[in-house]
Image (spheres, rainbow, N blue to C red):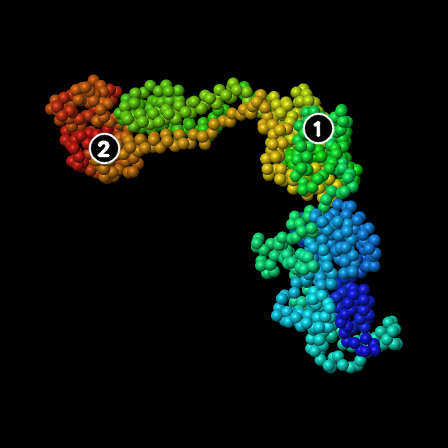
Amino acid sequence: MTAQGARAILGPQSSVESAFVADLATRAEVPVVSFSATSPSVCASAAPFFARAALSDAAQAGAVAALATYFGWRRVVPIYQDDDYGAAFVPFLVDALTAARAEVPYRCALPGGASKDAVAAAMYRLESEQTRAFVVHARPALAELVFATAVEAGMMARGYAWVITDGLTGLLGSIHPPQGVIGLVPYAPATPRLRDVRRRWARKFMREHRDADPAQAEMGCYALWAYDAAWAVASAAERLGPSDLSSPPGLVGGRSGPTDLSGLGRSTSGEKFLAAITNTTFDGLGGRFELVDGELAAPAFRVVNIMEDAKERSLGFWTPKHGLHRRLGGGASASNSGLAPVIWPDESTVVPIGWVQPTSGRKLRVAVPGDVDPGYGPIVHLDVDPATNRTVAGGFVIEVFEAAVRLLPYALPFEYVSVSSMPYDRLVEKVGNGDLDAAVADITITANRSQHVDFTLPYMSSGIAMVVPMRDQRSTRAWVFLKPLRYDLWLVSFVFLIFTGFVVWAVEHRVNGEFRGPPYYQIGTLLYFGFSTLVFAHRENLKSNLSRFVVVVWVFVVLILQSSYTASLTSMLTVPQLEPAIRDYASLWLGADKVGIMNNSFMRVSMTRSGFPPSRLRPYRAAHSFHEALLDGTIGAIVDETPYLRLFLKAYCDNFTKTAQTNKTGGFGFAFPKGSPYVADLSRAILNLTESDGMSAIERKWFGDAEGCAAQGSPFTSDSLSFASFWGLFLVTGATSLLCCAVHLATFLVVERRWIWEVASAPHVPLKGRIWMLLKRFDHKDLSSHTFRTKDGGAGGGSVAGRSANGAGAAHIAAGSPLSVSNHTYDMSEWSFDAPSPAPASATGESVELAAGDEAAAEVAAAPNPNLSCDQTDTGNLAGN
């Protein structure tokens, strides 16, 4: 820079050299463009005049994490070179794996000049651990040594997974990783220009190195980046022109010679040149060349499978946006997701799980509670075989755990360890501290416990509910007879009762003497008839078929209502109505009853945290203690998880019931230390058990098919009958009554149409008077009905004086009738509405008798009224009853 006047520096090749040169270039403000320094420790943020024309190693950390997630590796160990090149990459890798829920249990750092013995010792140490997924990030020389010793240690066998970063994959022509390794390499589009450059380079390389392996003539990613970096610097210099890059040579402001670093000057064209380089974009050999914050923009990575003789087989691609997919640009369809099948070490096609049981031979120490009450033995119990002094566990929990272990893809040796008189919170803490390897018990998954351990998926759902005594709630109140029917059904029944009586009266009163009489008498008859149908005590002789049809339908409805009422009332008074003494948690909260809880259960903390008075809580250990306390009234309810209450009711089901679940809990799960690889595998096994019939069969074995017992039955409750259950019947009877009423009214209007026309056409009669006349007409007897005829054909009904001897039978309007005068002033007193209407004589001239109870016919006028254009019979009918 000082002697030769360098305007920019292309290189250096290693990250260590790049850090030193970048520091000098920053002082001298000379741009440094590196195509091989991939360590994240050297970046533009620390050295502003440093530009990386290669991919940073941090860019591939996400791809490695995606592979771990895709293959289900929950533990990954990085093997890296312990220098600036390797150590700077590991923090980014650990962060990416942690975000992908994969653990880095330990790291294997190897010095760059490590001997074969040192590397072999490290490999044998890794082989004795549990992890079987490794990521190698080292220089080619150290990587070759790592793979050679791994083969000797048997670590390139089935069950192992190896991933190498792009620093090794890009040099497959120089190194030879074993078959089955997965590699990452930056994606370079296969353009015609790239193929031409590679062909010319290979021809030149083989001409100069005739004995070299043709694979060494392949241009790796570093060669492509070097070509693009030189092209970018040349393009930037060409755009600036000679005026900005020519004079003066060297650095301005330097105080001494070229070896005096403290006296470096400053380049006058450095900032412009750096800006020109960072703004240069083009499609290079390695893909799109574009510097973002001094770094080459991250393209896609190719995922390759190393085959025999270091040949690569493409598996797919990884991009920061779309993750792993088989074809680049194929979208996020299901057919394009994932990778092609991988051939793993030892030519295996089975995906390694990335973890195995350690070969030390130590069994997993599984804690099991040893002091479980016999009443809850079906959940978990522990016995000691006196012959072998071996701990034998049993119960639902144990059988589920052992069935899940049998489904694991590897052997899991374990032994049960009895723990007695230890609260589950303390047991969970011991597992979290490493004193125990696991806890297999009816441990409820809670937020507080999950801070200490990792739980498997719940193998049994659970919730908080209550068991309370049953009380006979049969009512002895005086008004209990009203309870079978709800108020809406009582009201509708009363309305329809009155309505049916009115319809029958309307149809019968003109033809049936039993429905006639003074108004109060007719109202009484209407009500009596309606209410008497409730007990089928109506004795009125119905004359009309319409009213008979109405009554038949109504009696059918009454029969059903009566039967339902009788059955409901009988059950209320005779059948025991068992109801919970405490209906819900709110009633328990507001009451004063003591509450029984399981000893050492989390229920005490949970209930007191929600505000329940601690003084009302009574802990018990045994199921029979709960039973005795409920019987003698010491406690009013048991609040516990549903599996325990289910067993309690199975043993003591008489006069007890379980109320609705108040809230849910996390269920029962197996506890393991944080980060244990067993959690995911056992969770998957539990899912397989649940989806198959295995879990149901185990549950039926220990809990049975039913939650209750035959002695208890189901609590009887007799709800009042409502209108919703009978609205169809009322619809039928209502429609029938309306139809019959409409037919009767239509018949009346047709028969009396001429009279109605005369009244409607009468002048000087107000509307009120016409309506009153129509109602009076409707109230009169229908003497033309067959019910008023005698056996000889005349009208019957009473023994009063006959009509005139000439048999004319004409009834005339009284002399005082307002219709007999053409210009008459309306006066209600002048209307003879009370005068009976004479019945017409029979056609044979026989005498006609008036109905009994009617008054004598008023004296009629000698001559008919000339203003009415109707015959004498119609006029007589108009005159009155």
Residue occupying image coordinates x 24% and y 28%: 880
Q: Position of residue 647 (x, y in %)?
A: 64, 27
> Residue 491 is drawn in which quadrant?
top left
Q: Is residue 696 above or below residue 327?
A: above
Question: Residue tagged by mark 1?
Answer: 381
863 horizontally vs 392: left or right: left
> Residue 61 is drawn in which quadrant?
bottom right
Residue type at mark 2: give it: Val
Which residue is more in the foreground, 116 or 489? 116
Crowdedness near tag 2: few (<14), some (14–19) or many (≥20) residues, C-alpha within 10 Å: few
- Residue 167 visible: no
Which residue is more in the foreground, 221 or 472? 221
Which residue is more in the foreground, 293 or 705? 705
Q: Position of residue 661 (x, y in %)?
A: 62, 33
Q: Position of residue 857 (x, y in %)?
A: 21, 24
Location of the C terminus (image quadrant): top left
Q: Which mark is residue 751?
A: 2
> Residue 25 is drawn in which quadrant?
bottom right
Label 2 to label 1, Cα distance in Å?
94 Å
Q: Position of residue 603 (x, y in %)?
A: 70, 32
Location of the N terminus (image quadrant): bottom right
Residue type at mark 1: give it: His
